[in-house]
Amino acid sequence: MLTLTQLVPRGLAPFDLTLQDGACLTVSGPSGAGKTVLLRAIADLDVNAGEARAGSLIRSQISAPVWRKNVAYVPADTGWWADHVHSHMPEGDPGPLLDALDLDRACLSWPVAQLSTGERQRLALVRALLAEPEVLLLDEPTSALDVDATKAVERLITDYMSRGATVVIVTHDDEQAQRLGDQHLRVDGGKVEILSREAG
């Protein structure tokens, strides 16, 4: 479960939010409205006010690294700090995740410079899922992917939610929001509006 109490991301109005285990919140809004700022505030990567809770963890009572291990943020433009893919992976077996995303298992030994934008996006998701966070914050995770790769990512996200994880995903794809979202949040003009999922 993710609970936000009077969270105030930079430049946005305060808001409250509760997401149950296994739920997905989709976030939309025009470019520059603050969608990424909102995700980074939940992850406590930028200055913000208010309180956040993930399961039994209260953000103000634990260290930032512990919070971010349990509330994982995957940016649209992922960071890579070493030369080869395997250097970025936490402990665990990435094989099943790579298979689910139709990635060659040999890619773990590839130079990061060899990766396409879409491969980087999918590998960043693998990296996050290997750490088994309680909450997954995804910033446009399929923006560089074709239809088949997008479907594979959505299946993996849905499977992860079925095991109790909570997901917040920024997307400009209304159909994707309908497929994945239990709740919808719109950021526009400095305001944060939380909506129920539309029927359809």
Image (cartoon, rainbow, N blue to C red):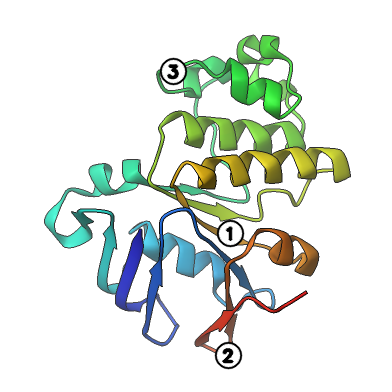
* Comes first in the chain, label 1 or label 2: 1
Q: Residue at x 62, y 9 (%)?
A: 109
Give the x, y percent position of residue 192.
50, 84
Work out how far the residue at label 3 is from the one at label 1, CA to CA, in angstroms. Answer: 24 Å
Q: Which residue is drawn at 41% across and 35% down?
A: 132
Residue 169's disc is 1
- Answer left or right for 93 relative to 149: left
Disc 3 on helix, strand or loop? Answer: loop
Contact between marks 1 and 2 (CB within 8 A): the answer is no
Contact between marks 3 and 2 (CB within 8 A): the answer is no
**Mark 1 belongs to which amino acid?**
Ile
Disc 2 on helix, strand or loop? Answer: loop
**Mark 2 belongs to which amino acid?**
Gly
Work out how far the residue at label 1 is from the one at label 2, CA to CA, in angstroms. Answer: 20 Å
The residue carrying mark 3 is 92
Task: Name which quarter of the figure residue 112 lies in.
Answer: top right
Task: Name the quadrant of the N terminus.
Answer: bottom left
Mark closer to the observer (1, 2):
1
Work out how far the residue at label 3 is from the one at label 2, CA to CA, in angstroms. Answer: 42 Å
User: Would you place residue 182 above or below residue 100 in this image?
Assistant: below
Mark closer to the observer (3, 2):
3
The residue carrying mark 2 is 189
| Residue 134 in view here | yes
For the residue pair 52 and 20, the one nearer the viewer reads as 20
For the residue pair 159 and 52, the one nearer the viewer reads as 159
